[in-house]
């Protein structure tokens, strides 16, 4: 079934493209969501008249994407997460966390669905994340994953104190047992 896309659709095309899709995809998703219209003679004629406007919008989108690419290029973003022994994370870094970190660092809104993590980030350190800004315009962002709880020494002290308290409570009990046995 031939349809005319009304906006960019990943993997299919951009606004104004005439594409051939499965009838079920068109009838159940594209048409109800108003992402496309049927490619009838009348709609194709209207498309020809709108081509100039579509080309202008496309130029503006590409220019905006290039500006965003220039702003993000070479950027380093830090995400804080709980890190266990040997640099393993408790959980993993998600696309939402990366998008929030980019927003905080550069004040640019990024779409979490366009972030390409590649694989689950489950270790602390430096990672590369690719952000697909618009169609073929992509930028690579350096991601530093660090520890939230830097003052880990305080926890160690608490554990040692707890161990000492346990030892003190056991010592008098052993002395009492020894005294009763004699």
Image (cartoon, rainbow, N blue to C red):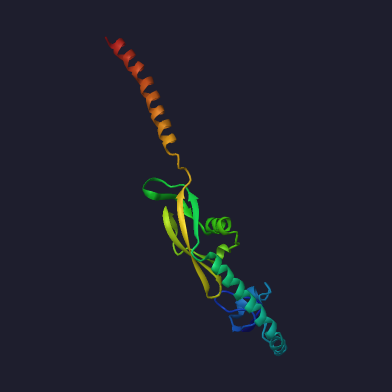
- In the image, is residue 171 above or below residue 128? above
User: Toward the viewer: 10 or 132?
Assistant: 132
**Residue at the farthest left position:** 182
Residue 123 image-quadrant placement: bottom left
Q: What's the residue at 37%, 20% (across, down)?
A: 168
Measuring from the top left, give residue 88's x and y in whole percent: 40, 50
User: Toward the viewer: 28 or 30?
Assistant: 30
- In the image, is residue 137 above or below residue 181? below
Q: What's the residue at 43%, 59% (across, down)?
A: 127
- In the image, is residue 78 above or below residue 114? above
Q: Would residue 19 be found to the left or right of residue 85 on screen?
A: right
User: Toward the viewer: 120 or 152?
Assistant: 152
Q: Would residue 170 be found to the left or right of residue 1 on screen?
A: left
Measuring from the top left, give residue 117's x and y in whole percent: 47, 63
Q: Looking at the rendering, in which quadrant would you find the N terminus?
A: bottom right
Q: What's the residue at 62%, 83% (across, down)?
A: 17
Measuring from the top left, give residue 28's x and y in whole percent: 64, 74
Measuring from the top left, give residue 146's x and y in whole percent: 45, 50
Residue 107 image-quadrant placement: bottom right
Count of labels in the image: 0
Q: Looking at the rendering, in which quadrant would you find the C terminus?
A: top left
């Amino acid at each position: 079934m031939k349809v005319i896309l009304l906006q960019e659709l990943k993997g299919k095309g951009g606004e104004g493209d005439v594409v051939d899709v499965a009838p079920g995809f068109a009838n159940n998703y594209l048409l109800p969501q108003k992402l496309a219209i049927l490619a009838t003679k009348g709609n194709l004629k209207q498309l020809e008249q709108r081509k100039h406007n579509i080309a202008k919008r496309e130029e503006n989108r590409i220019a905006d994407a290039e500006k965003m690419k220039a702003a993000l290029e070479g950027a380093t973003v830090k995400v804080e997460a709980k890190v266990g022994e040997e640099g393993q994370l408790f959980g993993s870094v998600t696309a939402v966390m990366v998008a929030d970190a980019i927003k905080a660092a550069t004040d640019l809104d990024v779409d979490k669905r366009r972030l390409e993590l590649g694989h689950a980030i489950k270790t602390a350190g430096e990672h590369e994340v690719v952000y697909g800004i618009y169609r073929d315009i992509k930028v690579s962002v350096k991601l530093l994953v660090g520890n939230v709880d830097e003052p880990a020494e305080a926890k160690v002290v608490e554990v040692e104190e707890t161990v000492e308290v346990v030892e003190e409570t056991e010592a008098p009990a052993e002395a009492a047992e020894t005294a009763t046995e004699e």
